[in-house]
């Protein structure tokens, strides 16, 4: 008989779970709905939200018989209600409706609303003690300290839905906190992993959107190309697992098979592996503390052949270095980092700046913010949103200067 206490808990024995999906029409939402679709008898959908894809949102609401649906754009409410005509599904629009979706009584909530707009809806779920699968980096990047404090106070359970943090979450269970030496977040390196700095500087939008391994939304794909996304993940890991910056390393791993590793004091390194499919970490969150069947491809290491690793290049990808700088600075600096990056990416998409100027705008904004004496602890969602708003305005004011230097 094995000395390892493996549970024998067949899927049929698991109780029915009510779920809400905030950001149901995005890429994470799509993967989540795919998992719910695979076992309809086990899940009851309480609420769904979307940004402005009314048709897709209404279709999901009808398919899953959701109780409440909200669209972020207030101007689309009448369109949403028309699409739901003949059903008993409640509907709403605008920020308050998205927050209401998070506050409704679901056992499990996928928090996948992108950007700072996802903070208050996620907090609404946290404050009622729900289990929250967190796929919105901004909740921690913009408001990490008080977000986790609120979760602790409410008895909420935060489960990391990002592949890297979910991997760390699984690996961390192999030891105790005082035995931890470091965590290692892996990075694919993105489409520009082998490019020279001069070529990265001139990269086009089409090139930035050609991720070698993952199918993601536009913003996160561009962040992956600049490695800003990995910087955001470093910040997120710090708040999520109460880690110091020096306890977090990044390792470039082009195959995206190992998603995260944890090193303990005896020098054992525990890694989580899997095919690059977001449904795997989402399935782990959806079934936790049990495991459910997932639709991702079976990992075939023989077919893959080899796994390779490289050190991150902070010179060619300065966005990663800036994340560590922001984390060490604290007092809202990570919020500024994220806000400035969102402005920079939007400017790049609009062809107002070159790809290489994304990191320069972020650095200029962070430096200006610190020089201006704006650093202060964030103690509420409104504090974080105010810093986010003001940092965006500062980044926009610096855009012409950054664009001119790059021309």
Image (tube, grey):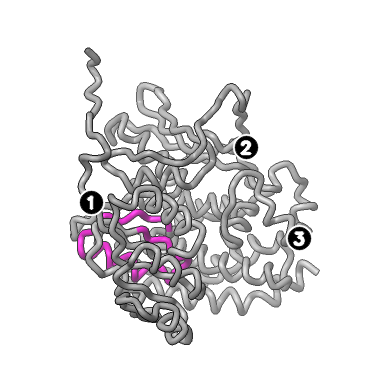
Q: Nearer the viewer, mark 1 or mark 2?
A: 1
C-beta proximity under 8 Å, tags 1 and 2: no
Q: Nearer the viewer, mark 1 or mark 3?
A: 1
Residue at the spot of label 2: 254
Q: Residues within 10 Å of mark 1 (few under 14, many from 20)?
A: few
Q: What segment carries the magenta color?
A: 110-135
Q: Quadrant of the image for the C terminus?
A: bottom right
Q: CA distance from mark 2 to mark 3?
A: 21 Å
Q: CA distance from mark 1 to mark 3?
A: 47 Å
* Corner quadrant of residue 69: bottom left
* Corner quadrant of residue 83: bottom left
Helix, strand or loop at mark 3: loop
- Whole-percent x, y for residue 125 in the image: 27, 64
Residue at point 50%, 73% (across, down): 55
Residue 331 is at least partly visible in this image: no
Residue at the spot of label 3: 204
Residue at the spot of label 1: 16
Q: Residue placed farthest to the top in the image?
A: 1
Q: Nearer the viewer, residue 286 or 88?
A: 88
Q: Is residue 267 above or below residue 343?
A: above
Helix, strand or loop at mark 1: loop
Helix, strand or loop at mark 2: loop
- Whole-percent x, y for residue 303 in the image: 61, 25
Q: Is residue 131 above or below residue 22?
A: above
Asked if residue 203 lies left or right of residue 394, the reply is right
Q: Nearer the viewer, residue 64 or 57?
A: 64
Would residue 94 be counted in the magenta stretch? Answer: no
Residue at point 31%, 29% (across, down): 174
Q: Nearer the viewer, residue 25 or 122?
A: 25
Q: Is residue 340 above or below residue 183?
A: below
* Corner quadrant of residue 11: top left
């Amino acid at each position: 008989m094995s000395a390892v206490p493996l549970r024998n808990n067949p899927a049929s024995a698991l109780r029915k779970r009510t779920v809400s999906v905030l950001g149901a029409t995005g890429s994470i939402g799509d993967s989540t709905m795919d998992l719910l679709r695979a076992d309809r008898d086990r899940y009851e959908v309480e609420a769904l939200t979307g940004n402005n894809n009314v048709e897709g949102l209404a279709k999901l609401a009808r398919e899953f018989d959701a109780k409440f649906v909200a669209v972020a754009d207030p101007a689309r409410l009448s369109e949403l209600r028309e699409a739901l005509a003949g059903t008993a599904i409640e509907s709403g629009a605008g920020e308050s409706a998205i927050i209401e979706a998070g506050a409704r009584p679901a056992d499990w909530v996928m928090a996948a609303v992108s950007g700072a707009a996802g903070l208050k809806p996620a907090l609404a779920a946290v404050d009622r003690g729900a289990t929250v699968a967190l796929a919105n980096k901004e909740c921690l990047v913009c408001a990490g300290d008080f977000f986790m404090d609120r979760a602790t106070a409410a008895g909420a359970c935060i489960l990391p839905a990002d592949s890297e943090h979910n991997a760390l979450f699984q690996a961390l269970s192999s030891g105790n906190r005082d035995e931890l030496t470091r965590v290692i977040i892996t990075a694919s390196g993105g489409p520009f992993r082998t490019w020279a700095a001069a070529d990265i500087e001139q990269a086009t939008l089409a090139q930035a959107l050609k991720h070698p391994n993952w199918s993601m939304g536009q913003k996160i794909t561009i962040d992956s190309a600049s490695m800003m996304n990995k910087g955001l993940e470093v910040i997120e890991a710090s708040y999520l697992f109460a880690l110091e910056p020096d306890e977090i390393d990044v390792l470039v791993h082009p195959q995206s098979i190992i998603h995260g590793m944890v090193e303990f004091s005896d020098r054992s390194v525990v890694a989580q592996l899997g095919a690059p499919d977001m449904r795997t970490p989402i399935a782990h969150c959806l079934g936790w503390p049990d495991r459910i069947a997932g639709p991702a491809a079976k990992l075939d290491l023989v077919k893959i052949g080899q796994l390779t690793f490289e050190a991150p290049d902070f010179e060619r990808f300065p966005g990663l270095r800036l994340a560590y700088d922001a984390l060490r600075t604290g007092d809202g600096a990570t919020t500024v980092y994220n806000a400035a990056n969102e402005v920079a990416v939007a400017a790049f998409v609009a062809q107002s700046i070159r790809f290489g100027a994304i990191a320069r705008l972020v650095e200029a904004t962070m430096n200006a913010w610190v020089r201006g004496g704006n650093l202060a602890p964030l103690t509420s969602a409104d504090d974080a949103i105010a810093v986010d708003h003001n940092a965006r305005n500062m980044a926009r004011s610096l855009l012409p200067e950054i664009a001119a230097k790059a021309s």
